Amino acid sequence: MDSAPFVSIIVPIYNVELYLRECLDSIINQTYKNLEIILINDGSSDNSGKIAQEYAALDSRIKYMGQENKGVASARNMGIKVAQGEYVCFMDPDDFYPDANTIELLCTKAQKNDALICGGCFSEYMQGKIVVDFPPHLFGYTFEKEDFVEYKDYQFDFGWTRFIYRLDFLLANNIFQPPYTKYEDPPFFVQAMIKAQRFYAVPEVTYRYRIGHKIGYISWDKKSWVDQIRGLNDVLTLASKNDLAILYELSISRAKQEMRNLSRGIYEGQIYFVSPVILLQDLINCAQKGTLDKAMINRYNGDFGDFDFIQKCKAAIIVAQKWHLYAKKYFRIRLFKEYNIIKIFGCTIYKSSKS
């Protein structure tokens, strides 16, 4: 490379051999050439690593790195630490840029306006179909005009990969992704936006997000769920501390949707989803009361080994009473004058209703 790169594109890679070439082609074929492309192989067991090394051998702008499987947040953080560009951006290895001039557009606008963060509109892609219109709760995916936007007027937390970020700004404020397996993106994005206070927006689509091919929440393990809840708690805490009422309510709505997903999972046979229900309901209750407590999140480990039988009964009641639409298969509650019957996974529990 003749000069220092203006932008570093960080791509964490894990078992994406079916989509990686399309992703990398969309990067190396950008009209803007002053790039550093950082590929971090996060312990892939398929041919992803070989494909990445093949591209690195053909393009001197590509820096290939490998590590044991530590998760996408670890890989992205490594990329931030080794990046040499004035700006950094992030690409998931199964996604791609919508146009050949996407990076040129973002770099030009960011440089001209001296923006700490610059980004455009979000789009989804599924089997050849492109989606650019979204429901009201995804209001932050699009911009109608080009201009600076104050984050207090925006208050959104999704779609962070369509932005570029000034590297020295991230490093000076110690902005990295938390070590979560799920929901690691929103805390990073919100923290960056709060610190920057504003960003420069363009109405063009700057990212294509592939959907319909990833493993759904039904296959998540318990650590994934507790990390999801930790991420929600982080965003709620940031919103609370910075008087971002719209973001706060949006995050509570997201938490309630996750509760529905958990209940649906229980209905479909994922018995271990019972334990995260307790943690998530506690988070929702605390958020609605304005009494968030990070210690509540941290006291649970990924195995939920400290949940006793009574607490699991509590989870059964939460799901059965509040989310009975999906819980009927596994929970039954019958109320009598002198006692209640709770049936959970075939075990019947009697509790006196007398005081």
Image (cartoon, rainbow, N blue to C red):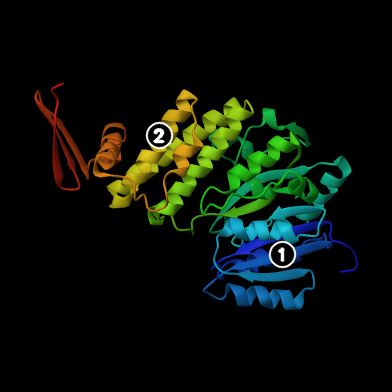
Residue 339 percent location from the top left of the image: 11, 28
Residue 82 percent location from the top left of the image: 74, 61
User: For the residue marked with disc 1, what is the amino acid?
Assistant: Ile
x 48%, y 58%: residue: 214
Taking the image as shown, residue 50 lies to the left or right of residue 166, namely left
Q: Which sits in the foreground, 238 or 251? A: 238
The answer to whether any part of residue 330 appears in the image is yes
**Vertical placement of residue 240 versus 94, above or below:** above
Looking at the rendered structure, which numbered label has been put on residue 282? 2
Looking at the rendered structure, which numbered label has been put on residue 38? 1
Taking the image as shown, residue 253 lies to the left or right of residue 115, namely left
Alpha carbon distance from label 2 to label 1: 40 Å
SS category of the residue bearing label 1? strand
**If the image is split into quadrants, where does the N terminus sit?**
bottom right
In the image, farthest residue toward the right: 2
**Vertical placement of residue 270 versus 197, above or below:** below
In the image, farthest residue toward the left: 338
Q: Which sits in the foreground, 339 or 140? A: 339
The answer to whether any part of residue 159 appears in the image is no
Residue 250 percent location from the top left of the image: 53, 32
**Vertical placement of residue 327 versus 287, above or below:** below
User: For the residue marked with disc 2, what is the amino acid?
Assistant: Asp
* Label 1 environment density (alpha carbons within 10 Å; few <14, some 14–19, many ≥20): many
